[in-house]
Amino acid sequence: MTFGPSCNVSQVDLSHHLSSEARMRKPNPMKEIWKLTRRKPNMVSLANGDPHFSLYPMRRIEYEMASIEEADPVAAWRKAGPSAASTKLVSSTYEPCALPLQTGLQYSHGAGLPDCQRVVTELTKFYHNPPDHVCTLALGNSDGIAKCFRLLGERGDYFLADEFSFSSITNVPLAQGIKWAGVKMDDGGMIPEDLENVLANWDTARGRRPHVLYIVPCGQNPTGSTLSVERRKQIYEISQRFDLMIIEDDPYYFLQYDSLSASTTDFSTPFVPSLLSMDTDGRVLRVDSFSKIMAPGMRLGWITSSALFHTHLVSYTDASTHHPHGFGQMLITELLSGPKGWQIEGFDRWVRSLRAEYHRRRALFLTLFEREVAPTGLARAAVPEAGMFVWIRIALERHPRLRGDLRRVPGGDRAGPRTNCAALMEELFERCLDAGLVIMPASIFALPVDAKDADVEDPVEDRLNYLRATFAGTEEAMEQGLAILGQTLREFFADEQQEMELA
Amino acid sequence: MTFGPSCNVSQVDLSHHLSSEARMRKPNPMKEIWKLTRRKPNMVSLANGDPHFSLYPMRRIEYEMASIEEADPVAAWRKAGPSAASTKLVSSTYEPCALPLQTGLQYSHGAGLPDCQRVVTELTKFYHNPPDHVCTLALGNSDGIAKCFRLLGERGDYFLADEFSFSSITNVPLAQGIKWAGVKMDDGGMIPEDLENVLANWDTARGRRPHVLYIVPCGQNPTGSTLSVERRKQIYEISQRFDLMIIEDDPYYFLQYDSLSASTTDFSTPFVPSLLSMDTDGRVLRVDSFSKIMAPGMRLGWITSSALFHTHLVSYTDASTHHPHGFGQMLITELLSGPKGWQIEGFDRWVRSLRAEYHRRRALFLTLFEREVAPTGLARAAVPEAGMFVWIRIALERHPRLRGDLRRVPGGDRAGPRTNCAALMEELFERCLDAGLVIMPASIFALPVDAKDADVEDPVEDRLNYLRATFAGTEEAMEQGLAILGQTLREFFADEQQEMELA
């Protein structure tokens, strides 16, 4: 792994994956001029309209951060609240610091401020040690993924994803004219054999065979599933064989848990190797984020890719969002490399402590589920190995109003659903709302596919009998929410008389 | 002007200006669900993977800002440096503040955090009082404009702009397949008659008549020109007549100066009315930025538009960058509405003081120019009424190696330039670099147009005899830079013997 855009190119030429927009994009002509300011020492510049830092109305920003001196820093920070031990980081114009205000708040370029790009590169190396890659800063996870979609996707293309995926992301490329092709999942996440099946049997009358796979390997949203090392290797091998680019979206990487029987996740438990770590070809674009491990409003993340895609990501960033804000970059640089900062070792202690905290939340959620919901016999929770979500299967087969013969009734659509699963789940969702509970229905996450691309043999409408719940919220929310869910399920399944209003 | 997306729609239906991508875009399905969390009081949510604020590793951010108690706050701040009077703003989880950390650093939606959207709306109302518009937060000026381009532009479209424009911006839509059509300028900026001429004589064989005008009304980059109120009214009237959308890019709005004969710009001098303030139809998308008046690295700005375009901007933001970072939003909210903040009155004092400061810089630049460059008789500086740039005309007609007959020489291109202006300017630019000065050549700003769209009668290559210089830098840079420029011009124009290596 190399720092900066001058690293070796990857061994496989993957430039044919670039979208026509990306290939048409020319670097900003101003950048060539800016480079000239370094032609020789002491160049005088009358070139750029950069406000002088003496005119910035701020001269010092102080961030009060958690101390990582405690054995379990997240627990200590959370319990003591305003009186917890802290460390103060400073970004200043006049005091020494890792990334001074006058640099941090000036214009920079698409890859981000070099100091911040460097610490993020070191972080990536620490956890993934990818073969030959470069980091590009992004404005959080969504921005990073949207940029990858724009970089690779062409109108009429199909992208591959889990058939249940996070709709805030799968919604993004639709307006570009990109369509989705779903891959089936089980408790272990994407099924490699189905991925291979979709690719091997691709009908090119639909369009060119998909060349982009979007995947969330840890604590997948919404199912909570995590890919085993074995599956990751299989998926990477399939990607090589079918020449796929992989967008590895991994916001929950640090939230990987020990088994439920353990009282907490041991700090020393290793993280499952990422697809990036296996990426000898340079076909992985990995998107990382600080949202789940620090705070979502930071809107700061990074993309790790081969130098080729890095160069194009930088050009696109310069021609769209521009580099991320200086605040987050100053904070991260100070945190990871400043004299009072956590350093990478302290960051590692924080994220390992954080996953122990989420381990406890997961345990609490599942204990409450056992108490409030499981006794109904009407729902079963999958135990997630990572992330923030529990995928709850509703036993609709036990519902008195379930119908399984919709295709055979007069006027039944031969390509449509066989069951009224979708309507019953909609009704359950509405009943939960009426009872005061917001919980996510599976329908929201069903990959948006064109009617003509729908799976006629095994329509997704018949497999919507799931709810997504999170254990990221408060203990009170879990306690109250699961009590409402249990009670609502009892009433809903007992209700034999009521007409199906929504069918 | 209304706060929030529920304002009255504008009186003219302009929805036909939306790009097919914008029209295809569907709102994020998750948003509908999130709204349900407000269906009734005390809803319990197990819906969203929002990390609880007690797990954010920061609990307090303190910003040390300039005091605006002084009569001329920018001068006081600049002169006293680290010992200047300051005011401390705080964003905190546990202390009272205008926008607490737990809200500011949580996820929000495309328009931005409501508290910040509100203060930015109040600011816009204070300066522009637009008829019926809504503000959408953006990640700075470039992000805002790039979003407007994506919202309005279709592959094959032509957009209109000054024939010399900021190439970092004009480069942006080219990869989308959008082309530029230039409008001629004089010292007063875009010439309304030429705008009308381009539109009235549009040959639809090139493509549909342009429907988007990109314009910088104050201190235009690179020419420094500012549109008079009269020209603004003419341009708006032409836009109505030819059904144009106007992207008003106005980062230098606050840097409008009194005449050069005044020793400073009076605090009470009014700002020229913006195109937004005249926008009865809802055809202006105005882009504002904090980069020039606070700091570029803030990467925070906002777009003011009719409710229709606001809605689409929010959808696009939700499907690309997501809302801007919380740091800048917390800072701006605290600054403009917090108990220790400047409030809008203090902000107004700051920007009026800032333009007085830039007035002094402009005066210094022009004084130095008179001393170092003007005596050569080889260059003339236009006096900018706003902004940060001086457009310097080089008297190439006096250069001994100027040729004006290139079309008549054997092999001369009848559609090409008549003169070797471009080659001589390239040579001058290189000589400046060799002498240690970076100054921007006009060629960098020539609107990028296809060869087939070039003006054959009056080719832009013959009008590249300008340099752009800035007075945003230090006094030393101006002093040294203009001395180098004067000396380099003398040598360049004295050089009758040297072969034209670059011709």
Image: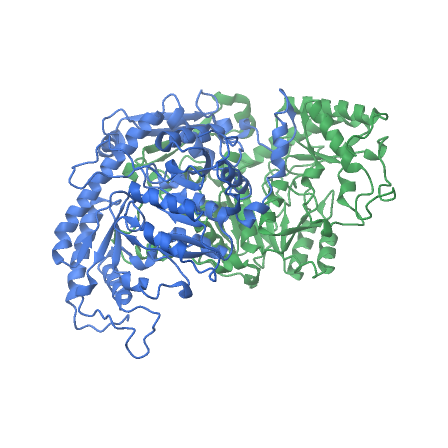
Chain colours: A green, B blue
Relative height, residue B324 to residue B412 (above, below): above
- Left or right: residue B481 versus residue A16 is left
Which residue is at a point 37% across and 27% down the rendered structure image?
Answer: B335
Q: Residue at x 63, y 24 (%)?
A: B39
Of all residues shown, which one is farthest toward the bottom? B410
Image point 23% across, 26% down: which residue?
B71
Q: Is residue B27 visible?
A: yes
Q: Is residue B466 left or right of residue B183?
A: left
Quick check: can you spot residue A368? no
Is residue B405 left or right of A268 when viewed as pictured?
left
Q: Position of residue A46 (x, y in %)?
A: 25, 51
Q: Quadrant of residue A13?
A: bottom right
Residue A360 position, x and y percent, is 64, 29
Q: Position of residue A475 (x, y in %)?
A: 64, 23
Comparing A333 with B46, the one in front is B46
- Relative to B461, say whether B362 is above or below: above
Residue B184 position within the rendered picture, expressed as x and y whole percent measured from the top left: 32, 55
Question: Is B258 rendered above or below residue B432?
Answer: above
